[in-house]
Amino acid sequence: YCVFALYTKDEKPDVCLSCFLLLLDIIRVTAFSRGDVTMPEWRKDPVTSRWVIIATERGKRPSDFGSEDKTRKGGFCPLCEGNEVNTPPEVLGFRKPGTKPNEPGWWVRVVPNKFPILLTDIDAIRKGEGMYDKIAGFGCHEIIVETSDHNQILSLMNSQSIEEVLWAFHNRLRALSKDERLKYVQIFKNHGRAAGGLLEHSHSQLIGTPVIPKRIKEEIYGAKYHYDYKERCVYCDMIDEEERGVKRIIAMNEEAVSFCPFASRFPFESWVLPRKHFHSFDIIGKKEISGLAEVLRETLARIYRVLENSPYNLVLHTSPLRTQFSESYHFHFEIIPKLTIEAGFELGTGFFINPTPPEEAAAYLRQG
């Protein structure tokens, strides 16, 4: 009845949000079937072999791109506990015993993105358009809600809470690795408007893709070259070097270490790695995740204090699904505070200008 009332423009003050969202789905599917809205697609740059997602559902006119703060603040939050009906059905939930999926009682929850960049219900069909290559916009897009507390943020959570978030990452990576259509799963967090965060409620995202990202390919090839030459993992060598010199170290324990990399691209760029060699995040065990969570917590907390809650991106770099690079690659987290802007020189050359030496950045963070 709510949908009918809304659709017929009957003025009813009690139209529920869940019915409104259902109606949006109906309109979206109808538009696709009519051809009024085009599907997202992958397009390949023929020079660099870099794939780009043309997210047509999120199409914007020039006037839609503005500098105003679009972060959703206050008011209704679809990610809060008690509002489960306003998200797609959960695919994973860490919850209190006796509580049911899609009901209150959870502390970490994973749901499909209501407005995904890529779509799971289409086939990853490769096509040509003259000299160009493209793929239908297949993939998956999920939201990892890191806490039921709207006012909590990852940087201020305790180690146990961060460990729970890491277990959610671990669980979804393992589950999605069974889908042969997916080649890579990118897990990331956008904290703050300048980093791309549009919702206040603390969350991460997951996007599964039918192609391996160019950046990951570059890391894999570089790591393999080092391994073929020295028969050692380049990331393990970096860990040994940083622990020996200490000056770029931020935090460490028996299981993990964080440091500002020698060739940092951005001010206060920080990496978090397991000290033991693991090529993929989804193969580590409880002891390693616990140690990793502690170092990640300390690193994020120090960045929060020293940079006064600066916006940042947190990105997990892990092996492609069903990979063969187990000896040479080493998964790691990269934390990129958003303190500078990539300008013409960086965009034109691919070179980065970092005004803060990593040795100084690490010193500030150790004192923070």
Image (cartoon, rainbow, N blue to C red):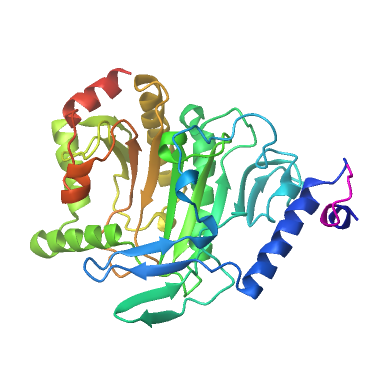
Prevalent SS, magenta region:
loop
Identify whether 5 is placed above or below 182. Answer: above
Identify whether 340 is placed above or below 136. Answer: above
* Residue 299 falls in image quadrant: top left
Position of 271 with respect to 32 (left or right) is left
* Residue 344 at x, y percent in the picture: 21, 43
* Residue 113 falls in image quadrant: bottom right
Give the residue furthest to the top: 367
* Residue 263 at x, y percent in the picture: 16, 40
Position of 210 with respect to 352 (left or right) is right
* Residue 290 at x, y percent in the picture: 45, 40
Quadrant of the drawing holding the C terminus: top left
Question: Which span of residues is magenta-colored?
Answer: 6-12
Can residue 353 be seen in the rendering of this structure?
Answer: yes
Can residue 328 be seen in the rendering of this structure?
Answer: no
* Residue 342 at x, y percent in the picture: 26, 40
Instruction: Please tell me which residue is depicted at 75% across the width and 42% down the height of the picture.
Output: 104
Instruction: Please tell me which residue is depicted at 71% across the width and 63% down the height of the picture.
Output: 27
